[in-house]
């Protein structure tokens, strides 16, 4: 049900006190005025602490700097006269005993009168003694259709037009912002170069950072990584590229649901976090990183409240990518934690949201230890797919060397024997390959020359890869993935032959 329909229903049902938490006073007041017109041109009285009542010349200035007097206006008007009384920022006075008592008295009286009090506030702050008489009504952020209408209005003013693709990207980027912020950022873009351009999508995303900075639960990540920066993982990249346009309005008209998310399970340093960053950059979506530890607070109920706040913020900024790194560490052993069930309740709220969410929040969770994850997390319906990211095969190691060397030595790439480097580094992860190149650069720099193939091989000989120091854990992950519980992120996902024999152990020891 839309806001207007629900609001009109509350008016007809004579709900006396309605509380609307919103930062968009102008927009919500316009919606209220439209509903008042539909219900027979009900009179609207708007009050704020500084100017008192406005709009009606007979009551102009009444109740200025006097919130109790503002409520007394309802008693001065005829009982049969319909009206909507909008009180801005009135939540600041609800703790006052006289205000609280007056509102409770009015709530009984207004049940038989066609009058409604609407409190507008930026936050929800309701004293316990008013919780039974106040009805909270959420006012949603602008829908894609409203955003598109606003962009078209600005385009008409500049005599410009945009392609459907650019329009979809711009509308998608603006979702999660208030209409006022959308107007400001688009006006800034027009003032900068005289028109709206495809590059203005990044300007809109930077505006979203302002919203993120107001909370310490989520972090906004600026990403420059591309899908091409990921060496290997061909199956995973194909899966992502296939869904690149699934957040567009055209996809909605086609009937496609929003993609839900991915769980990336695998060995440390194999590119799981890099993948999350590359998805956000390739899809032109903001990347929000959740540190699950920040959800837990010391006060009773605080953790659950922070979890709901995180969900609300992510959905307000949708479409977006929600990146949860090492989720296995956050929810491992939830049944044995002595925190009076707080972790279990937070986990329950989180996985329920994962299963039921309809908003375009694409969740990318990474995990190194699949044994630590609760079974409920792996159930179908939480994520679109679970991918296993294993150690890179030889040709994937070659691709990883090519990616890093193209960035470090773009003009001298031909000087490096990529095939030999890939062959001589079995069992190395992507992170270990990067560390090998950094060590080789130190060797060359200390001798006042560029680093060579021999420097890279010398650096590689000094590194003991994780595949050898954590053989049992890796073997368990390989067996788990091979049993069909996850989809392979690479067409070549397997342990190298060099360490495979060392990892053969009886099933009973795993």
Image (tube, rainbow, N blue to C red):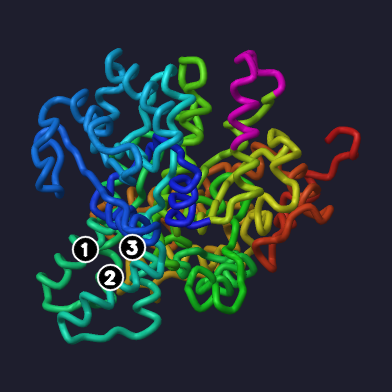
- Which numbered mark, 1 or 3, is in the foreground of this view? 1
For the residues bearing labels 1 and 3, Cβ distance under 8 angstroms: no
Residue in view at x 57 percent, y 56 percent: 358
Residue of label 3: 174
For the residues bearing labels 2 and 1, Cβ distance under 8 angstroms: yes
Query: Viewed as shown, does residue 473 lie left or right of 259?
Result: right
Query: Viewed as shown, does residue 119 lie left or right of 70?
Result: right
Name the image quarter holding residue 407.
Answer: bottom left
Residue in view at x 69 percent, y 42 percent: 377
Residue of label 1: 183
Q: Residue 341 lies in magenta, yes or no?
A: yes
Element marked by disc 3: helix
Residue 397 higher or lower than 372, as above or below? below
Say if residue 324 shows up in the picture: yes
Residue 80 higher or lower than 216, as above or below? below
- At label 3, counting other C-alpha atoms closer than 10 Å, the crowd grade (few under 14, some 14-19, many 20 or more) is many
Start-end of magenta stretch: 335-349
Q: Nearer the viewer, residue 450 or 281?
A: 281
Residue of label 2: 150
The alpha-carbon separation of the residues under discs 2 and 1 comes to 8 Å
Please provide percent x and percent y for residue 12.
Answer: 47, 48
Mark positioned earlier in the residue sequence (3 or 2): 2
Q: Nearer the viewer, residue 61 or 236?
A: 61
Element marked by disc 1: helix
Please provide percent x and percent y for residue 106.
Answer: 36, 26
Element marked by disc 2: helix
Residue in view at x 15 percent, y 32 percent: 49
Mark positioned earlier in the residue sequence (1 or 3): 3
Say if residue 446 shows up in the picture: no
């Amino acid at each position: 049900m839309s806001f207007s329909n629900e609001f009109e229903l509350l008016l007809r049902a004579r709900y006396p006190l309605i509380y609307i938490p919103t930062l968009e006073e102008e927009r919500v007041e316009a919606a209220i005025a439209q509903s008042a017109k539909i219900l027979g041109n009900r009179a609207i009285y708007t009050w704020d602490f500084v100017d008192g009542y406005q709009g009606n010349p007979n009551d102009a200035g009444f109740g200025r700097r006097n919130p109790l007097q503002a409520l007394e206006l309802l008693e001065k008007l005829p009982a049969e006269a319909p009206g909507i009384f909008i009180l801005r920022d009135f939540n600041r006075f609800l703790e006052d005993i006289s205000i609280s008592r007056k509102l409770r008295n009015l709530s009984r009286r207004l049940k038989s009168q066609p009058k409604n009090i609407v409190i507008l506030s930026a936050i929800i702050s309701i004293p316990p003694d008013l919780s039974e008489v106040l009805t909270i009504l959420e006012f949603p952020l602008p829908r894609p259709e409203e955003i598109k209408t606003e962009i078209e209005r600005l385009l008409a003013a500049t005599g410009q037009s945009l392609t459907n693709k650019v329009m979809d990207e711009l509308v998608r980027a603006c979702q999660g912002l208030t209409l006022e912020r959308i107007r400001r950022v688009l006006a800034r873009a027009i003032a900068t170069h005289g028109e709206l351009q495809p590059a203005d999508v990044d300007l809109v995303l930077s505006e979203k950072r302002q919203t993120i900075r107001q909370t310490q639960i989520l972090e906004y990540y600026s990403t420059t990584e591309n899908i091409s920066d990921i060496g290997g993982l061909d199956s995973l990249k194909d899966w992502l590229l296939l869904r690149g346009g699934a957040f567009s309005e055209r996809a909605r008209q086609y009937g496609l649901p929003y993609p839900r998310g991915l769980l990336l399970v695998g060995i440390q340093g194999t590119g799981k976090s890099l993948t999350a960053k590359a998805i956000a950059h390739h899809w032109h979506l903001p990347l929000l990183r959740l540190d699950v530890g920040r959800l837990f607070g010391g006060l009773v109920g605080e953790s659950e409240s922070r979890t709901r706040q995180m969900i609300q913020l992510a959905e307000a900024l949708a479409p977006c990518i929600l990146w949860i790194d090492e989720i296995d560490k956050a929810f491992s052993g939830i049944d044995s934690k002595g925190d009076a069930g707080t972790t279990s309740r937070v986990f329950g709220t989180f996985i329920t949201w994962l299963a039921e969410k309809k908003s375009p929040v694409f969740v990318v969770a990474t995990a190194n230890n699949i044994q630590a994850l609760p079974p409920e997390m792996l159930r179908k319906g939480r994520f679109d797919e679970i991918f296993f990211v294993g150690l890179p095969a030889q040709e994937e190691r070659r691709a990883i060397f090519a990616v890093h060397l193209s960035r470090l030595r773009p003009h001298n790439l031909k000087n490096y024997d990529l095939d030999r480097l890939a062959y001589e580094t079995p069992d190395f992860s992507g992170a270990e390959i990067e560390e090998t190149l950094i060590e080789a650069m130190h060797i060359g720099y200390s001798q006042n020359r560029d680093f060579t193939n021999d420097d890279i091989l010398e650096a590689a000989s000094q590194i003991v890869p994780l595949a050898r120091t954590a053989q049992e854990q890796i073997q368990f992950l390989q067996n788990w993935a091979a049993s069909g519980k996850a989809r392979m992120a690479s067409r070549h996902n397997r342990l190298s032959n060099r360490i495979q024999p060392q990892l053969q152990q009886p099933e009973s020891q795993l």
